[in-house]
Image (cartoon, rainbow, N blue to C red):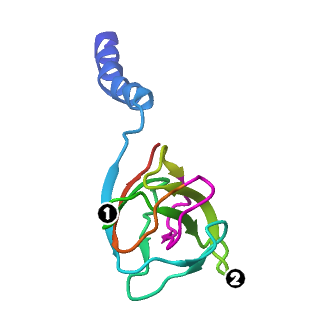
Amino acid sequence: MVIAVALTAAAFGAPVADAKKRKKKKKVRTATAVYDSPSLGSGDATGVCFGANGCAMFAIGPTERFISLKIEDTTGLPAYATVGQDLDPSDQFTDVIGRFCGETEEPMAIEPGIEVVVWIWALPGAQPPCPGAATTGQVTAKISNLP
């Protein structure tokens, strides 16, 4: 009887203990968005998305918490961009979560379930310094649950 209890505990207890020890697995998906005209406004805030695809928009799932972005403009130069999410739908503003030139250096933290908007600016940027002016191109996003 003691052996049966020990075997049952070993059989059912080990998987539970192993599950607690396992690390959360990183899940990454890649999405692209095309922009057909650059945005006008201030890179320190947000601006206006012109045309049908004036900004890059990315749907974010309920478990997705990080985003890395890369802009490929037809000029071949790095383009300046601002990244935002509408964290308070009761106001008319989109909250800035970051800025980058050409490509993010590290994944940016985002709120799950809230669309991400990327303004690709028509003029070079100041913070961070960015020499390129955008025309048309695409933005590639790597969206994940972990950094």
Give the main secondary structure, helix, strand or loop, of the magenta stretch.
Answer: loop
Magenta stretch holds residue 83: no
Q: Nearer the viewer, residue 8 or 105?
A: 105
Taking the spot 50% from the left edge, 82% from the top edge, the residue there is: 49
Looking at the picture, how far across and down is residue 34, in whole percent? 32, 73
Name the mark on residue 90: 2
Structural distance between the alpha carbons of marks 1 and 2: 28 Å
Quarter assignment of residue 54: bottom left
For the N terminus, the quadrant is: top left
The mark nearer the N terminus, 1 or 2, is 1
Q: Nearer the viewer, residue 49 or 136?
A: 136
- Region rendered in magenta: 109-129
Magenta stretch holds residue 118: yes
Q: Left or right: 124 with respect to 143?
A: right
> What residue type is disc 1 on?
Ala
Taking the spot 37% from the left edge, 26% from the top edge, the residue there is: 18
Quarter assignment of residue 142: bottom left
Q: Nearer the viewer, residue 27 or 35?
A: 35
Vertical arrangement, residue 20 with respect to residue 5, above or below: below
Q: Left or right: 117 with respect to 53?
A: right
Looking at the picture, how far across and down is residue 32, in whole percent? 31, 66
* Helix, strand or loop for disc 2: loop
Vertical arrangement, residue 141 with respect to residue 90, above or below: above
Vertical arrangement, residue 92 with respect to residue 107, above or below: below
Q: Nearer the viewer, residue 29 or 48?
A: 48
Q: Which residue is mark 1?
A: 31
> What residue type is disc 2 on?
Ser
Name the mark on residue 1: none
Quarter assignment of residue 126: bottom right
Mark 1 vs mark 2: in front: 1
